[in-house]
Amino acid sequence: MSGFTLPPPPLLPGQAPVGRAALFLDFDGTLVEIAPRPDAVRVPLDLPALLLRLRDQLAGALAVVSGRPLPDLDLFLPVPLAMAGDHGASVRPVPAGPVEAPPLAVPPEAWRLQAMALAQAHPGVLLEEKTHGFALHYRLAPEAGPAAEALLAGLVAGSPFQLLPARMAWEIRPRGPSKGSAVRRLMQDGAFAGRVPVFIGDDVTDEEGMDAARALGGLGWQLQDAFGTPVALRGWLAQAVAGS
Ligand SMILES: [Mg+2]
C-alpha cells in the first residue's frame, strides 16, 4: 500500500508519478458527466466500489469536493468517503464522521422568490436549492444566461454573498469558504497530513482547490487538460488501482 503512486494523466505523459498522494476529486463534470438537470446525473455502477478501493490504496487520503450539499453526495456515492460539500462550507474529514459546518448566512427569501420568478419567466431555467444559497441553471435555456447573471449580480452587490460562474449556471454563495479552504482543512487531518495534495476538477470553483493544493506543494489538474473527459478520468483511476 505504501508504494501506491498516481501514474501520469493520459494527456500529461511527461508528469512524474505522484507517490504519497492525497487525492481531491470534484464530482459533477469530473467524476461523472454533466447531466441536463443536476438531479439527472448518472453515476456509473462501478464508481462507488472504485472510489472505495482507491481510498484504501491512498490509506484514506481521498476526498470528494463538490458544490453540492453533502446529503446529495451521499445519495450519489453511498460509500464512506471524506467529503466537502457546498463549495467547502461543509467538510467531513473522516468517512461517516462528524460534519464541520460553521454557521453561515443564508440568502434572503426575497432573493429566492426573484430567482424563482426568473425561472418561471424562462422555461428551461432551473432553480437548484443549496444549503447556503442557490443556483440558476440555464443549460436548457441558454438565452436566459445573461438575464440570470444580471439578476443575481444585482442581488449580491454589497452583500456578504458572492456570485459564482459555473458551467451553464450562476450560483450565489456566502463569501468565505471555498474548495481551497476545504483542501487546507482536510490536509490537516490524519489520513491526509504529510501527503502530496492532488486536486482534479473541471470548473471555475475548482481552481481555488487547485491553487490550494499547489500552495501546499501539490498539483492541480484541470480535467479537460489532463484527462479530457470524466470517462477517461475513471479509466485512469481504475488503472491506478489495478496497477498497484
Ligand atoms: Mg465540476
Image: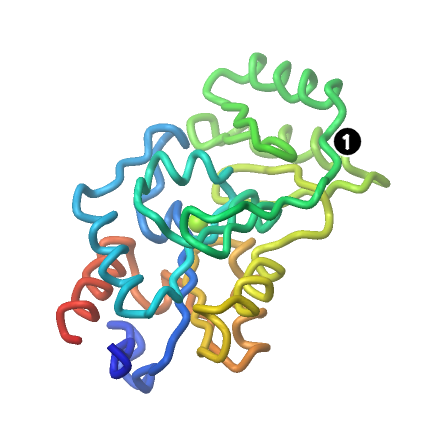
Q: Would residue 243 appear left or right of 131 to someone viewing this image? A: left
Instruction: Quadrant for the C terminus, please.
Output: bottom left
Disc 1 marks which residue? 155
Q: Position of residue 110 (x, y in %)?
A: 75, 18
Q: Tag 1: Cα neighbours inside 10 Å, few (<14), some, or many (≥20)?
A: many
Q: Quadrant of residue 22?
A: bottom left
Q: Give how far across and how far down residue 126 sits, in percent.
A: 50, 23
Q: Residue at x 71, y 29 (%)?
A: 151
Q: Is residue 96 above or below residue 116?
A: below
Left or right of 2, for residue 155: right
Closer-to-camera residue (21/17): 21
Residue 117's spot in the image, x, y percent? Answer: 64, 14
Q: Residue at x 77, y 31 (%)?
A: 155
Instruction: Report the front residue among 180 and 202.
Output: 180
The quadrant the N terminus occupies is: bottom left
Identified by mark 1, the residue type is Leu
Q: Position of residue 102 (x, y in %)?
A: 69, 45
Q: Residue at x 65, y 35 (%)?
A: 132
Outermost residue on the left side: it is 242
Viewer-proximal residue, 15 or 147?
A: 15
Q: Quadrant of residue 150?
A: top right
- Residue 220 in the figure: left or right of residue 184: left
Query: Assess mark 1: CB under 8 A from ligand 1?
Result: no
- SS state under label 1: helix
Residue occupying image coordinates x 48% and y 53%: 203
Q: Residue furthest right?
A: 158
Residue 235 against residue 29 in the figure, above or below: below
